[in-house]
Image (cartoon, grey):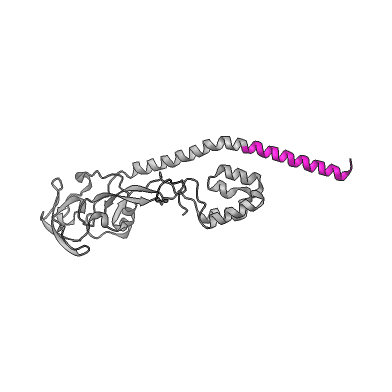
Amino acid sequence: MSTTHQKEFLLKKALVSWHILSMILFILTLSVCGALSSATESDVSRVGTDIELTTASTPNSMVSNTTSNETDDTNDNVKAASCSLDVTEVCPENVKCSLLGGECIDCDFNTSCQYGTIQKAYCSPKANVSCEGARRFKREYHCRYCYQLPEWQTWCNQTTDCALNKPRTHWPARPFFVSTCWTKSEFLCMGRRCFHKQASCNWSNGYKWSKAMLYSIFLGGFGVDRFYLRYWVEGIGKLLSFGGLGVWTLVDVILIGVGYLGPSDGSLYI
C-alpha cells in the first residue's frame, strides 16, 4: 500500500471513529440531560418557594412622613406575599396618631371626588392601635383608588414560576402572573390597600446578555454559549459538530444578539 493510500485509509478510519464516538456521546447526553433539566427546574421552583417564604411579611408602617432615601430603598425591596395584616404587629406605638401609616388608620374618603385632585379626609386610628395625641385628624390624599397608584407607590411580589420562553397556547403570547400588591404606608388611597393585579414575567436569574454574546462569538464553536444558557443537549451537539461547521455558531450569534435566544429557565438577561 502506497503512502498516499495509507494516509487516506487512516484519515477515513479516524473520521469514522470520530463519528461513532460522537454518536455514543450524544446518546449518553440525551439520557442524562433529562435529569439535568429536571434538577434545574427543581432549583428554580425552590428559589420561588424561598422568595415566597422570605417575603411573607407585610410592609412596615412609617413612623413619620420624612424618611431617608436609604430606608426607602430598603422598603422598595420588600414584597407582600398575602393580604393578611395584623395591625398590632405592624403599627408602631408611642407615636402621634396623625403620623401613623395608611394601614393603621381609617379615613372618611370622598368617593365622588374628581380623579387626581387633592382631597382632605378625617382619619382616626384603628381600634387596636395605640398612639398619642388627638385621635381624629385630617390627612391629604389624591383622589384615586389603591389599584390605580403608580408602581413606585406599591409593593408587589414577584414569581419565578412563569417563563418567557415557554410555548403559549392562548393570547397573549407573553406570559403573565397574578401579583399581590400592598400600598406603601405613606400613601393614602380609596378602597382596599391590598389588591391583586396582572403582572408580566420579568424576573432574572443572573444571566448576562453581554457574557452570552461574548461566549457565542469567541467560543460558540465549542457550544460554550449554549452551556452557559443551560441548553445541555444543544451544547453537546455544537461541541461535537464544531458549531455545525460554523453555520450553527453564526445563527446563535444572531439569535443571542437580537435577544431571541435567552436562558433556558425563561428568565430575563440582566
Towards the viewer: 140 or 4: 4
- Write the residue at 44% across / 42% down: 44
Which stretch appears magenta? 1-26
As displayed, is residue 27 above or below residue 223? above
As displayed, is residue 140 above or below residue 166? below
All told, the count of numbered labels is 0
Towards the viewer: 77 or 151: 151
Towards the viewer: 173 or 25: 173
- Write the residue at 63% across / 48% down: 222
Most extreme residue toward the bottom, as rendered? 117
Q: Quadrant of residue 99?
A: bottom left
- Residue 190 placement (x, y as % from top left): 20, 55
Most extreme residue toward the right, as rendered? 2
- Residue 69 placement (x, y as % from top left): 31, 60
Q: Is residue 24 magenta?
A: yes
- Write the residue at 15% across / 62% down: 120
Majority SS type along the magenta span: helix
- Residue 119 placement (x, y as % from top left): 17, 63
- Write the residue at 54% across / 53% down: 212
Image quarter (top left, top right, bottom left or bottom right) of the N terminus: top right
Q: Is residue 257 magenta?
A: no
- Residue 127 placement (x, y as % from top left): 13, 46
Most extreme residue toward the front, as rendered? 170
